Image (cartoon, rainbow, N blue to C red):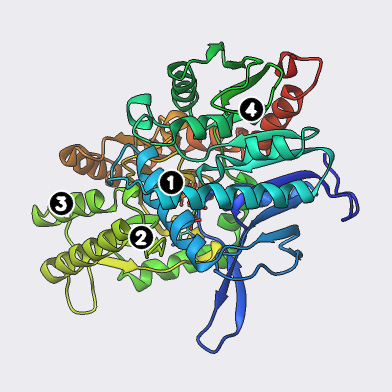
Amino acid sequence: QSQTSDSDQGSDLVVVANRLPVDRKVAADGTATWKPSPGGLVSALEPVMQRNSGAWVGWTGQPGDAPEPFEARGIHLIPVELSKKDVEDFYEGMSNGALWPLYHDVIAQPQFHRHWWESYVRVNRRFAEKAAENSAENALVWVQDYQLQLVPQMLRALRPDLRIAFFNHIPFPPYEIFAQLPWRRQVLDGLLGADQLGFQRPADANNFLRACRRNGLATRRGLVHLPAEPRFGSPDHHPSREVRAAAFPISIDAEQVAALGQRPDIQERAREIRRELGDPKVVLLGVDRLDYTKGILHRLKAVEELFAEEVLSPPDAVLVQVATPSRDRVEEYEKMKRDVEVTVGRINGDYGQLGHPAVHYLHQSQDREELAALYLAADVMLVTPLRDGMNLVAKEYVATRHDEQGALVLSEFAGAAIELPQAFLINPHDIDGVKAAIVRAAGLSPREATRRMRAMRRRVFEFDVARWASTFLKVAASAAEPSTPGRVT
Ligand code: ADP
Ligand code: G6P
């Protein structure tokens, strides 16, 4: 629906995200390769951008100079440079040491440092400038996620012709928590540079609207009214306008994921995985980035107790936990990684046998084919985050299960729980509740499994990522039309 003009004029659709969809990995001998980037943002947006021509502005995942723009995986990529210090202060510090824990219900203690904030402002400006240089006249620029909340306002100042949209992939916290942020007004102002703001759940959009009201702005049915006055110390005069905020739950490319589950070689690999695990009766599976929000330790505690009580007994029942390495220089992540290692070691020491560990723990990223085979091999998928914007793993599991078998245990604190009520919904803090759900899921009759899985698959196929993107972009384009209330002056 959008077209790339020639490179001098820029693109008509520009995604701006902290990460590019590919991650530059440098080996010990200095050779560099590109790997898919971790996380749900890239999983969701990559298929969208492969279908729409446009450009993607982002970071390569490595400190140092940015390479020239290039094409990869069918997308035009425009790298932004982050120095080693930017990585420490903007990425590991402000983004992942302050905003990430704050926005995820302060599960970990956020830290606020003024030099982190200064770096956040500088790096957001760099992203805004790069997007401004690469956008065609009247282009739609779609800014992504908590790392870039100041970009909408900065971009509007640089290029008033652009239509600007922002999508927040993670939760937006209740005001009582958001208010802790020393730079809360600057963040609201930054976001309000957009014409359209998108959130995962209605509760996130409402939390944002409430934060606006608490900061003196009038809101009316999903619209924030910005008066004509200069606000928050800005010397420039701005005409009044309105910003729209609403929920657009993100999804996956269900057809693409399902196609993997249909492939005979992947089905054979799933059978082979079960053989490699020793042909257990019950395979439990966890697939996550190694992040404290994912509730991996709560999940391990529940499984350990079930083993101790012999409700489930290795080697007849095993847990496979695959965890992508993530943000491992941030203190809370280092600590969590050690805790997971100690816990897995203890469970295996107590319940493993020679050649038959009770928990198979892989601290590795797996390719899409191997993940699909693992999903097919699993009787019970454990998705137990303490807080999660959406959680695409839950949707990928459902889409892969064309056999309509398998059971999903899903935290009610994941955005996905709203769409998948046929899962076994749990409160991950209630360990007895998690244990009971695992036992029910493991003992599910094939008929009941089909009933639940069929309903969940219907939802995931109907509301896939293509629908998410087209709905969002349509609303965003109309929000910026001069004839609608989006740009009343
Ligand atoms: P988040 O964005 O917080 O990481 P999501 O569940 O929304 O959480 O998205 C995670 C994405 O990363 C999914 O597309 C999933 O397939 C992928 N993923 C998770 N763990 C692994 C792994 N060990 N190897 C490869 N991909 C993984
Ligand atoms: C989540 C965030 C993304 C982020 C991803 C991976 O999905 O919402 O913005 O890119 O995690 O995290 P990383 O820090 O490796 O980019």
Quadrant of residue 246 within the rendered picture: top right
As drawn, 240 above or below 59: above
Amino acid type, label 1: Gln
Residue underneath mark 3: 306
Label 2 lies in ligand 2 vicinity (Cβ under 8 Å) = no
Q: Residues within 10 Å of mark 3 (few under 14, many from 20)?
A: some
**Residues marked 4 and 3 touching at CB (< 8 Å):** no
Amino acid type, label 2: Val
Name the element at disc 1: loop
Name the element at disc 3: helix
Q: Nearer the viewer, mark 3 or mark 1?
A: 3
* Rendered residue at 11%/55% (across/down): 310
Please identify the quadrant where the C terminus is shown.
top right
**Residues marked 3 and 2 touching at CB (< 8 Å):** no
* Rendered residue at 54%/43% (across/down): 145
Amino acid type, label 3: Leu
